């Protein structure tokens, strides 16, 4: 690598350090990650419940002529 490339990487790392560590913006990223994971967990639970309800309805509808 030449000196210009190393200088560019050093500049980028310095800006990341300032933005994330010095200005405490990593806390915003962690909060967003926590919220995203919570939404994913609840969406999975709700989707599973809906799927179970539909499967139970379809199972019991097979023997019932009025529902099928």
Image (cartoon, helix red, strand yellow):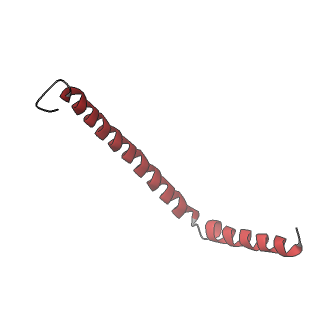
Residue lying at 53% horizontally and 57% vertically, measured from the top left? 30
Q: Is residue 66 left or right of residue 39?
A: left
Q: Is residue 30 left or right of residue 12?
A: left
In the rendered image, the quadrant that contains the C terminus is top left
The residue closer to the viewer here, 43 or 28, is 43
- Quadrant of residue 44 in the image? top left
Q: Give the farthest residue toward the left.
A: 66
Residue 60: x, y in percent? Answer: 20, 27
Q: Give the farthest residue toward the bottom.
A: 4
Residue 49: x, y in percent? Answer: 31, 38
The residue closer to the viewer here, 37 or 24, is 37
Residue lying at 60% horizontally and 71% vertically, measured from the top left? 23
Residue lying at 54% horizontally and 61% vertically, measured from the top left? 29
Residue lying at 48% horizontally and 59% vertically, measured from the top left? 32
Residue 16 vertical position relative to residue 57 in the rendered view, above or below: below
- Quadrant of residue 53 in the image? top left
- Quadrant of residue 9 in the image? bottom right
Q: Is residue 29 left or right of residue 7?
A: left
Q: Give the farthest residue toward the top.
A: 63
The residue closer to the viewer here, 32 or 50, is 50
């Amino acid at each position: 690598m030449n000196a210009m490339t190393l200088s560019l990487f050093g500049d980028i790392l310095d800006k990341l350090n300032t933005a994330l560590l010095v200005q405490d913006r990593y806390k915003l990223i962690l909060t967003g990650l926590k919220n995203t994971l919570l939404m994913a967990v609840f969406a999975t639970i709700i989707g599973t419940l809906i799927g179970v309800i539909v499967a139970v309805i379809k199972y019991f509808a097979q023997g019932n002529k009025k529902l099928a």
